[in-house]
Image: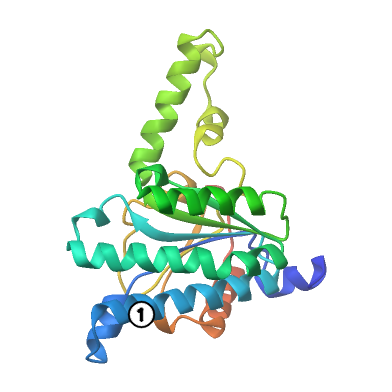
Amino acid sequence: MVDAAQAADLTHGARHIAIIMDGNGRWAKKKHLPRALGHKKGVEAVRNIVRVAGEMGIEALTLYAFSSENWSRPADEITDLMGLLRQYIQSDINEFDENGIRLKVIGNYKALDSDIVQLIDNALERTANNDRMTLAIALNYGAQDEMLRAVQSIAAAVKRGEVDPDEINISHMSGALDTADLPPLDLMIRTSGELRLSNFLLWQAAYSELYFTDTLWPDFDKRELQRALKSFGDRERRFGGR
């Protein structure tokens, strides 16, 4: 396990990284393989990057696994993705616990199949006290939906008389989001050459650094993560100032 000084060197000061994992299908197509094998290879990349991030000393890693818009994909592809999710949780929960990784899920995962919900709930409970790194998985997640739910939560608090509407501020909003207990987002990475955020962590990304790479997600490895962190470390973050 790295100490604080080593972590600062390896992460270039980034505490919270988010990744839009894109390119599984294109990776498979490029190799003339079934799309399902691209998703399977993508899960292997997830497993590798989670390990690497933990070894580097990253405090929080948020991965965009399944968006609220992904339901429009073909039914057989969704079935494959849900099957891989089941396998991943079942196969890696012991490693999460042994390595001090706290699992967190953002988005409306309760809308998934009941057996998946049970697997997730058990994993969340089992890893709740781990504090080496938080792995946040975005499932059935959309940033606009997240912000809407946050506003509804604040409105309900106002209705109960717990919050004065004239005193609502940015902290109220940030505290009502799914990521309220995570460090501020430092770096957003998107693989596969696409140059958009795709409804992911829109509020949290307000002053995060953005890094886009042509590398397809199944090929994203330790070296690619190091490049992204090096790019982050070379930038001057001014947060709107000079």
Instruction: Tell me which residue sits at (27%, 84%) in the image.
Output: 28
Check the image and report above or below for 2 versus 224. above
Choose between 215 and 1: the one closer to the eye.
Answer: 1
* Percent coordinates x, y for residue 204 in the rendering: 49, 47
Say which residue appears at 55% left-offset and 85% top-offset: 223
> Which residue occupies 71% across, 55% down?
130
User: Is residue 46 shown above or below 156?
Assistant: below
Residue 174 % position (x, y): 53, 36
Report x, y in % for residue 169.
53, 25
**Labels in figure, total:** 1
Left or right: 79, with 100 as reference point: left
- Rendered residue at 34%/41% (across/down): 144
Q: Is residue 203 left or right of residue 8?
A: left
User: What element does badge 1 sit on?
Assistant: loop
Foreground pick, 60 / 165: 60
Image quarter hosting the N terminus: bottom right
State whether residue 183 is above or below residue 100: above
Residue 239 seen in the figure:
no
The residue labelled by disc 1 is 214
Identify the colour scheme used: rainbow
Disc 1 packing (10 Å; few <14; some 14–19; many ≥20): some
Residue type at mark 1 is Asp
Splitting the image into 4 quarters, where does residue 81 fall? bottom left
Farthest-out residue, top: 161
Q: Position of residue 13 (x, y in %)?
A: 68, 64
The residue sitting at the bottom extreme is 31
**Does the image show residue 159?**
yes
Foreground residue, 232 or 15?
15
